Structures are given as structure tokens and as C-alpha cells.
Amino acid sequence: MQHPLYVAFVWHMHQPYYKDTASGEYILPWARLHGAKEYVHMAEVLGQYPSVKATFNFVPCLVEQLQEYARGEAVDHALTLSRQDHWSEEEKAYLLAFFFSANWERIIRPHRRYQQLLDLRHQARGGHHLFSDAYYYDLVAWFNLVWIDPTALRNDPALRALVEKGENFTRADIDLILEKQRERIARVLPLYAELQARGQIELTTSPYFHPILPLLIDLETARRASPQLVLPNCSFRHVEDALEQLRLAVEAHRAAFEQPPRGLWPPEGAVCPELLPLLQRYGIRWFATDEAILARSLNTSIERDAYGHVIRPHLLYQPYRVDGLTVIFRDHILSDRIGFVYQSMAGKDAAEDLLGRLRTIRERLNDPEHPYLVAIILDGENCWESYPEQGDPFLHHLYRGLSEAEDLRTVTVSEYLEAFAPRETLPQLATGSWIRGNLETWIGEADQNRAWEVLAQVRRDLMAWQNAVPGAGLDVLEAAWRQIYIAEGSDWFWWYYSHNVSTEEPLFDRTFREHLAGVYRIIGLPVPPWLLQPIRSTAEPRDYRAISAYIAPHLEAGAEASLEWSGAGFLDATSSTGTMQRGERGLLRRLYFGYNPMSVYFRLESWVALGSYEVSVFLRPEPPSGAEASFGLPAEGAPPETPFGASWRVDLHHGFGAVLKTASPRGSWLEVEAAVASAATERVWEVRVPCQALGISLGDRIGVAAALLQDGQIIEALPPSSLHYFTLDERS
């Protein structure tokens, strides 16, 4: 009898360690808000389908934060403001900026009063002094209400009454909302422990403060996948820190869930061969990483057809033995479809798409003699606010379909491995992460490298003090080393990376350095002046980069721009649309622009699926000052006004490529035959346009703007209101 296709969902639950240990206040509220919403809701939904199994990975520093919130001990800045009766002018400005941090379309707009508050903010253009305390009471109430699971808002009578009330909230109303949040957070860990006890889920862990383990073991490991990477000007090789992060994690997991973890998700799927004996030391039996690591380990590629189906499915969909451990590899495409694609589809259609893709995998395997495992691994919290109804229709249709399926069977990872031992052995384990198979997201740029150098220096100073003061108290040493371990977390280096843009970057920078400054305060030494200087100041601004070299990138539209785009300039949406808080961001993320003597290149990155929009790049070439144009509009004369005054545009035809068009005198766009090359994925479009087609050459200038349109109308553009010009200078 043929096996069903086994499916392992691994939902990764993680938030950075937000607590400022000097003040005791959490710098951001996301552990609290996700705790009151997605963390408890994911377990509640799964619990309604007892035959559907899953694995949940909890990072211990998140568990610690949830426990403090559940006990009522944790305080974050947003919570402090929510408890106040009145606010200073500075506090009102913060409320107006931060308390709309939710998906405007999916979360704010369905609530009439919350949408009205947002509209009023737009009209006031940031004038926080224009609003009464009643406005801010309603704002505080709604911000905290929408960060409670919508199911609870419907089913809890007290919460439902507040939603129906809608406005004129009182201090007592807000206090009730905050207490309901705390009650839901207190349910999170017991609920997962209950699901584990009845065998429906497996609970796994990550190193305590979510560090990139290969980089702790040795920064030089980053060059295995990126040989030309510029590394920090320091030596950092600390296997002992990796061991301690693992030891702390296993102990904390056992304390929280009453049994040790059998599996582990290395932060960001980052692995290296030296990691394997460390995992074995603490009883880890299996770990997971990305298909990119499998490809590099086998010196092959995971090839897919035009629909994203793996051409050699036997390669990916099974566990492997490696040095006494078992490793499973996530299907990158299926995981990303849940993370980024299905949010723009109806829930039933999205669920049917995933179920259909799983059945296609089973058909293509066509191996009745052997079992196979599909691993779908992604964040368990962040994507749902972009889904209709917070993902409920998708999850319910998916879990119902899996419950009824005979050809598909969900399993926990350990359950599968207990029934079916790995049949294949890896000759080696490649070093890298789930992001393009390398470690460049956390090391290699100026800010990242400076952060590693600062961390290394503080660690050396602590070691020197510890050796010089042999009688130092254990409590002092533990407190000082804890600051080091916190600073080793991946999130600090993630936000120092130029590809990851947030208005909270100065806050993360300050907090990273504050943890390291805490080492000196704990051991009674003065904080070095260099630790008081922002690390971010060592690099160019994050929202803009000028062209530095010719480029000739292969067009692949990968999730991250390849090194071949390193000579290009870029422009971020944040520099053009004003300061945007988390959840307040627009549709477009970044526009790259570059050239060589033969072609101009553009790469557009979006926060949303491009398939829902018409996508265009508008261009206007200009000759050097005083020169006569040899390009531009047809001779009959200038056309009526075109977007940005552009004379050319490149349109993405989804599934077919790109088309170059020129403006006609009557305002229409005429297609031009040209060797335009293009590559597109869900959220990225790369395009190459021959200079000859535009009539331009070195020395000319060209203006560019990218736009998303619906029914021919621009919904959002980057830059938003004018072209960005650059000169095609001759370069060596």
C-alpha cells in the first residue's frame, strides 16, 4: 500500500529580547501584542482539528518575555502610556506615531472608529496638539483592542461590548482591555503544553537569545559561502558561547514544558559542520534548515519548473543523516507561499492551492515503497496580520482539508523520525542560512562588522576583568555574561544590514550598545566613550545609495539582491514617503538602479505580491546640459501629460516578461520592439533595457520612477511624486 505524503509544519515563534536591562522596560511591545493575538490563536485553531499535527519552535528569550507579561511584571513603553490618564505633548506625539502600528487595510479599516482616528491623523498632518484627550483615549483603546485575537473579540462578552461601543472609551475600559491581554498571554504556554501532552504537537527550541551559531563558532565560517566577503577587523571564535546559548535553551525549555526538546531550529536556519557535536552534547536528535543548504551540501541544485514544483522531488522530501544527527530541509517555495503569497488570495483558494501542490509532490514522487516528508517552516506570527480575517479562513480550510485527506498526513517531526529512519546520508553539511544559503544578512557590511568588533572588544574586556579579579561573585559574572549573550542575538545584526530598513533602527542600535555598556556597569568599570557612539553612523544612509560601479547582473529576481547588484544605487520607500512605523509601511520597498555602457538595469522590491497590480517603470532620458536630444518623444510634438512627465515606460506582463513603450503625442503608449530582459517573482521584478532602445549613451542622464497601478491609476510610486535622475558616467 502506498504511503501518504507526510507533511511537517514547523511554526517558528520568535521575538527579539526587547527588555532594556538597565531600566527594566521593554523597548517595544511586540512580545505582549503577539502573545495576546497570534501565539494563543495558533494553538486554539489547531486544537479544533485533533488529527492535524504540527511542530512549534519557541525561542527561550520569547518564552521568558511571555512569562513576565503573564505574571504582570513586564512593562513596555506602549503599555506604560496605555495606563496613563493624561499625556505630555511628547507622549501624544509618540501615541500618534506608534499607535497605528497595525495593518491598515486588514486590521484598522474594518473598525469604523479606528479608521476615523487614522483619517483625522492624516488631516492633522502630525499635529498631535490638535486632538483632545478623548481622541487619545479612543486611540489607546483601539490599538490594544485590535492586538487581541479577533475570535476573542467576538466570543468574549466584555470585549465584544467594547468593540460595539466603539468610542468614548474610559480609563476603566482600557484597564479591562489590558487585563484581557494579560489573561490571554497567560494562556499561551499552558495551552501548548496541553497540546503536546495529548500528542498533537511537538515543541522544539532555539539557542536562548537567537544567535547565528556559525558566527559564534567562528566569524570566518561566513566566507565558506561568500569567499569575497569583507569580515570584521577582529577575531571571534567562541564555541563556548554557542554551547552556553544551547545549554541555557535546553534548561529553559525543560522548565517551561516539563520535558527536554528533541529538535532544534538553528536561528535563521544557519548551520555549519562544527555545530553538530554541540547539538549532540545537549541531547538534540534532529535539526532543520533550508533547501539551499541541502543543494550546497550535495553540490547540486534544487530545480523547479515554471509552476514552482521541484523537478527531482526525491532529493528534497526526505530527512538525511549527518554525523549522528538527523536534518530536515524546508521547502522554500511552499513556506514562502504561506508567508507572502496566500495573504492576497481568498482563504479557500489559498488552502486549495497548497493542498494541490502537496498532491502534485506525491504524484511526482511516484514511489509507493518509501515514505517522504515535506517540511514547511516559517514564522508563526508575523504573516497573519496581512491575511483577510487574520488568516482564519486559510487555516480552517487548510486544516479541514488535511483532516479529511487520506493521501496527505500531518506529523510532528519526531513522530515521523520514530517511524521512518533516514535512508540517505549527507557527505557533508554546508555552511549557510535560509537566506540565499549564506550568512551575509548578519556580517560583511560596515555597520554589521563594526557591531561584531564592538562585541568582541567588550567580551575581551570582560574576560580580562574576570581573570584579574578571581574572587568576583558568581552573581556579578552571570549578570555580565548575560549581557554578552543578549548582544550575540541575530536581530541586532539583522537590523544593521542595509537591506532591512526600519524607523526603529536607532532604537535597536542604542539598545544593542546599552546591553554591552551594562557589562561595564555590572563589573564596576567606566563605559568606554566609543561605546556611546552610534554604530549606524559608520555607514552611508540606509534610505539611499549612489551608483558606485558598472553592473551586469544576471536577472533572477531573488528574495535578496545578489552581489552583482552591489554597484547599483538604491532608493527606499522610507526616504520618499516619510517616516513610517511598523505596520504602517506602504506597498513598495526599494528601487535599485544601475547601468553599464550597453544597458540600464532596475530592480523593484515590494512588500506585497506584485501579481495583484499592474507594474511599471517610468523613464525620461535627458541629454547633457546644452546638448541636443537624440531620443525622447516622437517628432509630432509633446503628448498630453504623462506620469512624471515620462517619455518611456517598461511594463511587467505577469508570466510573460516585460514590454518597452513610448509616449505618443495623443497620450497613449506605443509598444516598441526592443530586447528587454526581465525576471519576476512574487515580490521582486528585475529588468534590463538596452541603452540603444532609449537612444541614450554614456554622459546622458535618465530619470526613473517605479509604480504599482490598478485600472491604469497609480496606487503607489517610488519616488512618489517625481523621477529620480542619475547620470550615466563613464566608469573604470
Image: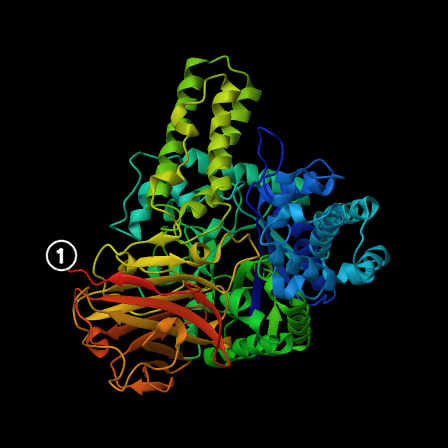
| Residue 411 visible, this orientation | no
In the structure shown, which secondary structural element does the residue marked by tag 1 occupy?
loop
Choose top left, top right, bottom left or bottom right for residue 215.
top left
Q: Is residue 146 above or below residue 230?
A: below
The part of the image, by quadrant, that contains residue 590 is: bottom left
Residue 297 visible to the viewer: yes
- Horizontally, residue 299 falls left or right of residue 387, namely left
In which quadrant of the rendered image does the N terminus lie?
A: bottom right
Amino acid under disc 1:
Ser
Could you tell me which residue is drawn at 34 percent across and 60 percent down? 296
Q: Is residue 517 left or right of residue 29?
A: left
Q: Horizontal placement of 149 versus 632: left or right?
A: right
Q: Position of residue 698 (x, y in %)?
A: 16, 66
> Which residue is disc 1 drawn over?
732
- Closest to the observer, 666 or 586: 666
Q: How many neighbours does mark 1 have within 10 angstroms: few (below 14), some (14-19), or many (20 or more)?
A: few
Q: Residue 31: percent from the left, percent from the top?
A: 63, 46
Please report the residue visible at 82 percent of the width from the left and 56 percent of the height from the top.
Answer: 162
Residue 93 place in picture, x, y as percent: 61, 44
Q: Is residue 480 above or below residue 653?
A: above
Taking the view exactly as shown, the residue that stands out farthest to the left is 732
Relative depth, front residue between 471 and 348:
348
Quarter of the figure with residue 702: bottom left
Along the viewing direction, whichever of 197 and 602 lies nearer the viewer: 602
Q: Position of residue 2 (x, y in %)?
A: 56, 79
